[in-house]
Image (cartoon, rainbow, N blue to C red):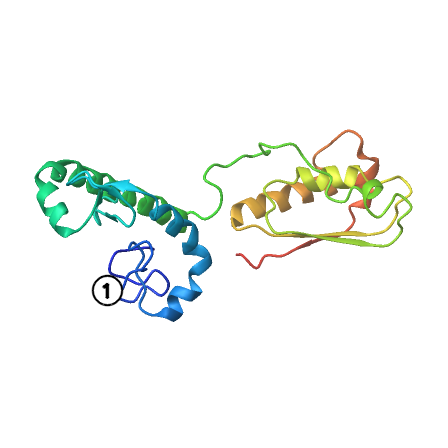
Amino acid sequence: MNRAGYCWRCEAPCTQRCSRCRVAFYCSKVCQKQDKWRHEPNCDNAVLKTECSGCGVEREGMMKCSSCLKVYYCNAECQRNHWAKHRSSCHKTAEETIKLVEQMKKFLDMKKLNPGVAATYYWGNTPAVDLINLSMNEGEEYSSPLALLLCGVGDPRNVLLTIASLPDAYTQQVTFMLNDICPCTLARTVLLLYMLKKGIITIHKSNHCSKFLYLRTSLSSF
């Protein structure tokens, strides 16, 4: 996080600024050199001419108010002289920033307690995708076993469409390694696939379901 008084590379306390923009802080030449490619665009923007909110002078190298980062000043004296006018808007911006940070913290805390997607879609909210698509990749004449790793399962539609889209001539084994950050999502997917394999759920166009002979589940996230 870029903060006034702290190195923009290693976050160590420091007082030295970038000599060009006078905005970024660096504790050493090494940190400044390592941060060159990240800081360069911001440095270019900072050296554009801006108007001092205190005296009205327009030039390069102005310094931002370290609290709200909205207004520019020539120096500390201009900032002190303008503080009576700027105080209200500066405090308002700071309060809004703190409020936003608190909201983000609550959201991140909720994500830690409830990993996975924010909303549960029991049958997906996007079109299913053929993950293999033999005709466009290995070719329909491909005759070797296939193995797929799904890091985010979501729901089983992609697996089912992939199986149903296999050419009739393909008779090899297809292995699906399923995983997901949310244990409930993974368990639901495995259960639905198991029910389909056992015939508990009936679906149309099931001529390819016989190819679903081997399901290997990775339960490392449990």
**Kind of residue indicated by mark 1:** Thr
As helix, strand or loop, the secondary structure at mark 1 comes to loop
Q: Residue at horizontal 88%, vertical 47%?
A: 171
Horizontal arrangement in the rendering, residue 65 relative to residue 11 (left or right): left
Q: How many marks?
A: 1
Q: Residue at horizontal 87%, vertical 45%?
A: 139
Looking at the picture, tell me which residue is in the foreground, 33 or 20.
20
Horizontal arrangement in the rendering, residue 209 relative to residue 222 (left or right): right
Q: Is residue 13 above or below residue 118?
A: below
Q: Position of residue 127 (x, y in %)?
A: 65, 32
- The quadrant holding residue 161 is top right
Q: Is residue 126 above or below residue 31?
A: above
Looking at the picture, tell me which residue is in the foreground, 199 or 190.
190
Horizontal arrangement in the rendering, residue 54 relative to residue 48 (left or right): left
Q: Residue at horizontal 34%, vertical 60%?
A: 8
- The quadrant holding residue 9 is bottom left
Looking at the picture, tell me which residue is in the foreground, 204 or 171.
171
Q: Position of residue 71 (x, y in %)?
A: 23, 41
Q: Position of residue 149 (x, y in %)?
A: 68, 53
Label 1: which residue? 15
Q: Position of residue 190 (x, y in %)?
A: 63, 46
Q: Is residue 199 visible?
A: no
Q: Residue at horizontal 28%, vertical 61%?
A: 17
Quadrant housing the N terminus: bottom left
Looking at the picture, tell me which residue is in the foreground, 142 or 184.
142
Furthest residue to the top? 204
Q: Is residue 136 visible?
A: yes
Disc 1 packing (10 Å; few <14; some 14–19; many ≥20) = few
